[in-house]
Every structure is written in C-alpha cells, then in structure tokens.
Amino acid sequence: MNMEEEIQNLESRLVKFDQEIGQLEVEIEKGNQKLKEDLRPQLEAIRQRRRYAEERLEKARLEKAESWLDEDFRAGLLAIFDDIGRRIDSLFGRVS
C-alpha cells in the first residue's frame, strides 16, 4: 500500500470512528445515570483523541512524503488510530 492509499484508509477509519462514537452516545444515553456518569468522561477522551488523530492526519496530508517517510511519525499515527479503536471497543463492551 502506498502513502496515498494509507492516508485514504486512515481517513475512512476516521469516518468509521465518527459513526461508532455516535452509536456509543446513543447506547450510553439508554443506560442508567451511573453508567452515563462513568462513561461520558471516557467518551470525551475518545473524542479528544479522535481530534488529535485528525490533526496528525492533516499534517501527513499537507507534508505528504516528508512526514510519511518518517517512520516514527507514521508508527505514532497508526498507534493513535489503534488506540481509538481499542477505546471504542472497550466502551461498547461496557454498554452491551
């Protein structure tokens, strides 16, 4: 997969994260007050992490090859996306 394809893949993951965050919000609102209080801060942390991922991805788009060739930058960006996915899965596990 080349750089452009990887960036497009990550952009698609951001869209998927948005959908999953929306689903989480609905599920959390269905829960009892204690669950809502427990999970809202975690959901906000996911939103912040998602915004950070989008900023980093934007940097990759703007700088293209320069930042993408920096293995630390690329690995760090991929780790952020993986972390968001794990956090979302964890919250789904708590509301299901």
Image: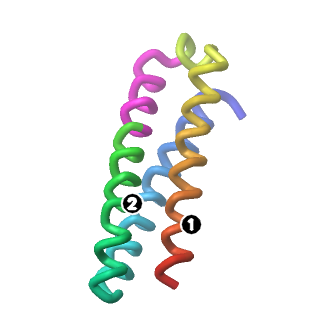
Residue at image coords 52%, 85%: 96
**Dot in front, 2 or 1:** 2
Quick one: SS at disc 1?
helix
Residue with the most extreme right position: 1
State the quadrant of the N terminus.
top right
- Whether the magenta-drawn stretch holds residue 63 is answered as yes
Left or right, 64 with respect to 37, comes to right
Residue at image coords 36%, 80%: 35
Q: Where residue 65 sits: x, y (%)?
A: 56, 15
Question: Which is the main secondary structure of the residues drawn in magenta?
Answer: helix
Left or right, 46 with respect to 84, comes to left
Q: Where residue 76 sits: x, y (%)?
A: 58, 29
Q: Which residue is mark 2?
A: 42
Going by the numbered disc 2, the residue's amino acid type is Gln
Q: Which residue is mark 1?
A: 89
Question: Which badge, 2 or 1, comes first in the chain's sequence?
Answer: 2
Q: Is 2 situated above or below 68?
A: below
Q: Where residue 83 sits: x, y (%)?
A: 56, 48
- Whether the magenta-drawn stretch holds residue 62 is answered as yes
Q: Where residue 47 sits: x, y (%)?
A: 35, 52
Looking at the rendering, the stretch of residues picked out in magenta corresponds to 53-64
Going by the numbered disc 1, the residue's amino acid type is Asp
Q: Which mark is residue 53?
A: none
Quick one: SS at disc 2?
helix
Q: Residues within 10 Å of mark 1 (few under 14, many from 20)?
A: few
The image quarter in which residue 77 lies: top right
Q: What is the image's colouring? A: rainbow
The image quarter in which residue 10 lies: top right
Disc 2 + disc 1, Cβ < 8 Å: no
Residue at image coords 31%, 66%: 40
Residue at image coords 40%, 75%: 23
